[in-house]
Amino acid sequence: MNSASSIATQPEDADIVIFGASGDLTNRKLLPALAHMYRWNLIAPGSRIIGVLREKHEVRGWNEQVHASLLKYAPDIVNNNTLWNGFSRMLHPIQGDLEDESFYQRLSDVVEDSNTAMNVLFYFAIPPAYYHVTSRNLHAVRLTDEEKGWRRLVIEKPFGMDLDSARHLNRCLLSYFDEAQIYRIDHYLGKESVQNLLAFRFANAVFEPLWNRNYIDHVQITVAESIGIEYRGGYYEKSGALRDMVQNHLLQLLALVAMEPPAEISATGVRNEKIQVLQSIHRMTPEEVKTHAVRAQYGAGMLDDEPVKGYRWEKDVARDSNTETFVALKMYIDNWRWQGVPFFLRTGKRLPSRVSEIAIRFRQAPLNMFKHTASTIEPNELVFRLQPNEGMSLSLNAKQPGLTMHLHPLQLDAPYAEDSSNMPEAYETLLYDVLLGDATLFNRGDEVEEAWKVVTPIMEAWQENHKVTLYPAATWDIPGMDELIAGHEGGWRQL
Ligand code: BG6
């Protein structure tokens, strides 16, 4: 989040060391983001992208591999010779086995070889099992030392698989890096429409007086995907939707909606307030889990007229798996602002479409003054569309044009950007922020642990009772979902 101005500042020169340089994340997200940053002068010209590859032949073929990935995910770069030539000059592959101590000495020599400032960004695009050994070895050769330039570490989720493993991971990272050097990515925070929540809430005075239990009936946060688990069965079997999406992305969205105005828009200001929200979320009792939490798994179905298989038939998934691919929760925040206001969260795979949004449903008007015209009054609703079609809308009741006093719903709709194709991708924003040393959109260690505390009672209750119900792929026919919201104005939004 470049706070200074809309004219972006160029960060200092840095070496960007990607561990896992041939992996899927690197190809799909990191390289395209870096290439676009290069295009917009958001990487200083003396910077290098040092790709750590396991095999020698990968080192030899890295340029071609990067070219092929960009052709798929950032064709605008490779289709322009000047851009591609400039960007490819930044690429420096290096062969390295993460468990081999001597590799880190070679890496250190490469960094020392730099003609420019010795700032280094380490990006762990590697399985979590390697986080420890890699950090330890970086530390052993003093690559974590900030004497000659800054040293920053970016790590991806999952940050542990439960509270204990998250604490363990934090402790381990903190024995080699300072908290201020660690950037824990939640890519949802890098999305333009998510950052806009901060702007909307803290740059407009009109909504703040309404932003509480006196005017808001409930909040709905939905992150629906139409894709299945694709090739990630091995990971997903151990994770499920609660760990994969709720513990991080959905709780972050909830925190941004519910937080108090921070002392300042800065890493400390924003993260201090988000953690207060997470701490105030009511921890469900085992009894409450039965009525406030729904889980389900997709069965077979038809998506866009094509048959799709059920979760249990996906690759690397057990035929009797009880892993949830859908979760819906009713959560409460025990503080003065939100007491008694339910936050309904739902997320799942193989739903009818990809749509993410946050809806604030206000309370019903105290009295229908237009009953005599048989008009109904709908509660007002403010919706943030996060993806696709990023934007905001506010639904109101208005007079229908004509001689009688009939009402009809009126929608005020604003797209987030006139041309959303030019919006930076989440990874561009986040990598740029790391280069600038701005951690506002990253999670602090204590925040991650707090989020695990919120989901732990649900995980535990579900462990006791394994049984998950099924829903037909590409439908919202999820057993128990409607009961969760019963009695609340309007029910779930139809998406
Ligand atoms: C990831 C999850 O964090 O977010 C995936 O691991 C999920 O399972 C993805 O598909 C969704 O991200 P986006 O940006 O496509 O909404």
Image: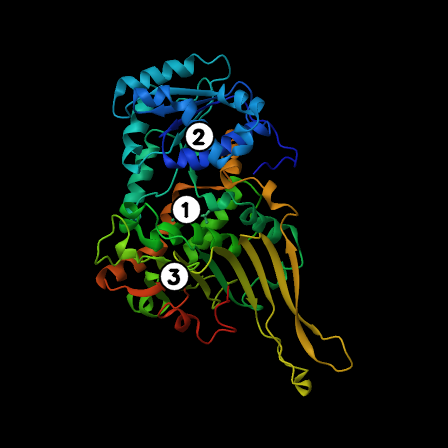
Residue that badge 2 annotates: 68
Q: Is residue 139 visible?
A: no
Asked if residue 410 can be seen in this view, the reply is yes
- Mark pair 3, 1: CA separation: 39 Å
Instruction: Determine the image quadrant of residue 472.
Output: bottom left
Residue drawn at (47%, 46%), measured in percent from left and top? 188
Task: State if disc 3 and disc 2 touch (CB < 8 Å).
Answer: no
Q: Quick one: label 1, few (<14), some, or many (20+) residues within 10 Å?
A: many
Dots 1 and 2: beta carbons under 8 Å?
Answer: no
Which of marks 3 and 2 precedes in the sequence? Answer: 2
The foreground one among 163 and 50 is 50
In the rendered view, tell whether residue 353 sits above or below residue 93: below
From the top left corner, tell me how far across and down residue 198 is, in percent: 57, 49
Dots 3 and 1: beta carbons under 8 Å? no
Q: Quick one: quadrant of the N terminus? A: top right
Q: Which residue is mark 1?
A: 447
Q: Is residue 253 left or right of residue 229?
A: right
Characterize the local packing of mark 2: few (<14), some (14-19) or many (20 or more) Cα atoms within 10 angstroms.
some
Q: Earlier in the sequence, mark 3 or mark 1?
A: 3
Q: Residues within 10 Å of mark 3 (few under 14, many from 20)?
A: some
The image shows residue 203, relative to residue 215, as above or below, that is above
Q: Is residue 196 above or below residue 479?
A: above
Q: Which residue is mark 3?
A: 302
Q: Earlier in the sequence, mark 1 or mark 2?
A: 2
The amino acid beneath tag 1 is Glu
- Give, as a three-letter code, the residue at label 2: Ala
Q: Nearer the viewer, mark 3 or mark 1?
A: 3
Q: In the structure shown, which secondary structural element does the residue marked by tag 2 occupy?
A: helix
Q: Residue at x 39, y 41 (%)?
A: 445
